[in-house]
Amino acid sequence: MGAVAIRRSWAAQVRRVAFTVAVTTAATLLASARAQPAAGHNRSDTEWLQAIQNAAQRTNYSGTIYYQQGAEVRTSRIVHQFDGAVAYERLQVLDGERREFLRKGDELQCLLPDSKRVIVEKRPVTGNFPALSTAAPADILRSYNLRHGPVDRVADVECQIILLEPKDQVRYGYRLWVDRSTGLLLRAQMLNERQEVIEQMAFTEVRIGETFDLARLKPSWSTEGWRIDKIEKKPVPLPWSFTIPEGFRQLSAVVRRFASGGKDTVQAVYSDGLATFSVFIEPVQGGGVPSTTKSKGPINAYVHSLGDTMITVVGEVPPNTVRDVALSVKALPAR
């Protein structure tokens, strides 16, 4: 994959914060929750996770979000709306390179005005804040213990603090601030084994339950005449075996080409419902590369050579997890 590809895959993982949603009916949830404000206090563990999933996808909301990783802080503005069948979203990145993301269902567009380019791909809702997970709550609770903390406020909204504590050392923990009325996730922190915050996201201001208005979802720029690049992902069988930590399952296995003229790279993605890591496998010329560990906040990567193949495992899991997975990769016997 090379240094450039590693950095790009790394950046893609950094943007992909290990938080995702599953959905049911939120219009009823919103109405009943506001009519009975005490109901949230009596939710079961499964009901709390389901409420977070519902609200992130099927509630109308907008606001400003900050993302902090160490000394780095970024902000964005989000508008999320649901028409009763399809979720729409507009996310404006307010720092650094000008970018804007538009979503309709599982189609995602990334607008890059400086290069007059639109990148289009099919990407199911996975882990972008305030989403939590598309996994069933029961699957999450197999790997994490849920514990209730005190009531607190975020963006002037009363929230229930919920802790998701890992049952082993192969994943990080989470502290969540959840609107007690609607179930919308308003702040999320990722915690290492010492209970230190290694990443957090939160609304600094939020409006919940707004009227559906397609005009608020229009892009900031006219894209007439811009280049449109469609990313196609080709599912592939994996001629490799891995030792995957308990609780993780494969979400996808595709072939990617990270640069023009570059070699095809196999990417397999694994998740336990919250934490996610990817395994990249690509041929290299001129022998192997030395084993290397890299870390940035909650993102850890391990690069390892296996003959003329380079293995890179990267994700929002502890360093030992990516190392152990990378070292377990073996080629299956040719048929």
Image (tube, rainbow, N blue to C red):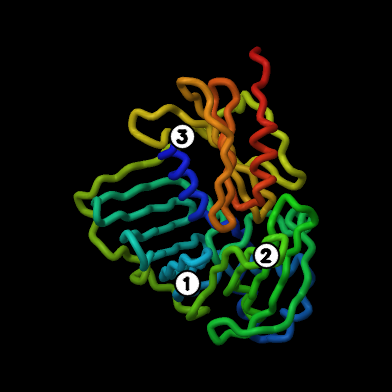
Q: Residue at x 57, y 52 (%)?
A: 299
Q: Is residue 257 left or right of residue 310?
A: left
Q: Residue farthest to the top?
A: 335
* Residue annotated with mark 1: 65
- Mark 3 — residue? 256
Residue type highlighted by circle 3:
Arg
**Which element type, helix, strand or loop, lies under badge 1?**
strand
**Residue lying at 59% horizontally and 33% vertically, measured from the top left:** 304
Residue at the spot 73% in from the left edge and 56% down from the top edge: 140
Identify the residue at horizontal 70%, vertical 53% (top origin): 171
Disc 1 crowd, CA 10 A, few/some/many (<14, 14-19, 20+): many
Image quarter in which the C terminus is found: top right
Crowding around mark 2 (Cα neighbors within 10 Å: few <14, some 14 to 19, many 20+) is many
Q: Looking at the image, which residue sits at the far left?
A: 225
Badge 2 is on which residue? Answer: 174
Residue lying farthest to the front in this orientation:
290
Residue 104 x/y as whole percent: 44, 57
Q: Secondary structure at mark 2?
A: strand
